[in-house]
Amino acid sequence: MKLITNNTEWKKVISILLVAFFLIACEKKNESSSNNLANNVITITKKIEPQFKYVKNFTEGLAAVCVGNEECKWGYIDRDGKFVINPKFSSAGNFENGYAYVRFIKEGVSTKAMLNKKNELTLINSSSKFVRIYEDGLTDNDISFGLVPFARLVDGKTQFGFVDTKGIVKIEQIYTAVERFTEGMAAVKVGGEKGKWGYVDINGKMLIEPQFQFAYGFSEGMAKIQIGNYEEGLNGYIDTKGQVAVTPKFKNANNFYEGLAAVEVTKDGTKKWGFINKSGELVIDADFEFRTNEFSYFSNRAMVFSDGLAAVQVFGKQENRWGYIDKSGQMIIEPQFAEAKGFSDGLAGVRIGNAVDGKWGFIDKKGKFIVNPIYDDVQQFKEGMAAVQSGKDKEAVWGFIEKQ
């Protein structure tokens, strides 16, 4: 048996015991309250027991869920967890204006279709190349402004366009790549792999001529663009008329939310993050570091203002922790979490312990746990529902909790 001989080792043991005690207390609190947690006027109820392999957020009262293991099939459930459209699809998008984009195998061929809430399908014949995940959790397969990207092969090359909910081609497949529609416009790439990006409207009219190395969706009237190649290019922003609103000078940057955007700058020889306004002024100093996977965290809306707060990462001498700042840059919820997601419906998912086996729960804007950290992963609240995961890897299953 190894004896503990120094203060550092004692501190580690005490920290482990405190986390274990906290998790046990959380479990017992949940059980004793019949899976209901209350704090003033906010009540969270375990609505749908964890049972699904994968899930998406609720949109228009329905959520896409996947059941099975090796051949997971997607269907749609209502807020009571009942299947209203049985699981039979190889992939399924979110509903918008009564339609969702789905895929299924027909006679050994991947077939695309538009699905309505009556379980009626409109087939679409096209090939596809890849699916991109966006900051709001949506994908290229999700409908936006009644349109969804689709593709065809021309001389062995994939070309993209857009189809409407009836399967009618609205924008011809003439582009090397496309983004989904945001604020009435979509970024499109012309001229092959080394081509440039511009923007079209929902009728396919080119509103902003192709001129950018990379271009992204609009948010609050601003779109992030990049000048130069991927490795050395710089990011800036344009307005809806295509005019440069913020000069490209940032190596990395996020979209605008609530009037501010997170950008990366070099400060004292270190890459750090701060926030700019729509004039490009650094209004919150670059005091935050961002060493985790950028793509996955932006997808969870970290480093993004929502409900007046933004999750930021602060590095100490030994470890990094996440907390929340307001728009003045003041730390409102002290850095204490292993991971953190953006606020939605007044609640934010946070992880205690470490980023490997720590547990997730939800806090309010005062930093108080409303949903105790007992889950292995969580998604944001949408339409009053949030997906929560129990178990890991092959044992992982998802269910939903409800905010009342």
Image (cartoon, grey):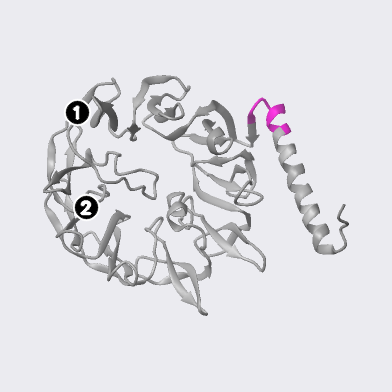
Residue at 34% x, 31% y: name it: 90
Query: Where, by quadrant of the figure, is residue 2 drawn?
Result: bottom right
Q: Is residue 29 magenta?
A: yes
- Helix or strand or loop: what does disc 1 sit on? strand
Which residue is disc 2 drawn over?
177
Which residue is disc 1 drawn over?
123
Q: Position of residue 40 (x, y in %)?
A: 63, 37
User: Label 1 is placed on what type of residue?
Assistant: Leu
User: Label 2 is placed on what type of residue?
Assistant: Ala
Q: Is residue 60 visible?
A: yes
In the image, which residues are magenta? 28-36
Tell which of 373 and 245 is nearer to you. 373
Residue at 76% x, 53% y: name it: 15
Q: Earlier in the sequence, mark 1 or mark 2?
A: 1
Q: Position of residue 144 (x, y in %)?
A: 26, 41
Q: Position of residue 247 (x, y in %)?
A: 30, 72
Q: Which residue is the extreme one toward the bottom?
A: 268
Q: How far is disc 1 from disc 2 in space, using C-alphas? A: 22 Å
- Helix or strand or loop: what does disc 2 sit on? strand
Q: Quadrant of the C terminus?
A: top right
Q: Residues within 10 Å of mark 2 (few under 14, many from 20)?
A: many
Tell which of 272 and 223 is nearer to you. 272
Tell how many labels: 2
Is residue 33 left or right of 400 when viewed as pictured? Answer: right
Q: Position of residue 61 (x, y in %)?
A: 39, 28
Q: Residues within 10 Å of mark 1 (few under 14, many from 20)?
A: some
Q: Is residue 396 visible?
A: no
Q: Is residue 117 magenta?
A: no
Residue at 48% x, 22% y: name it: 80
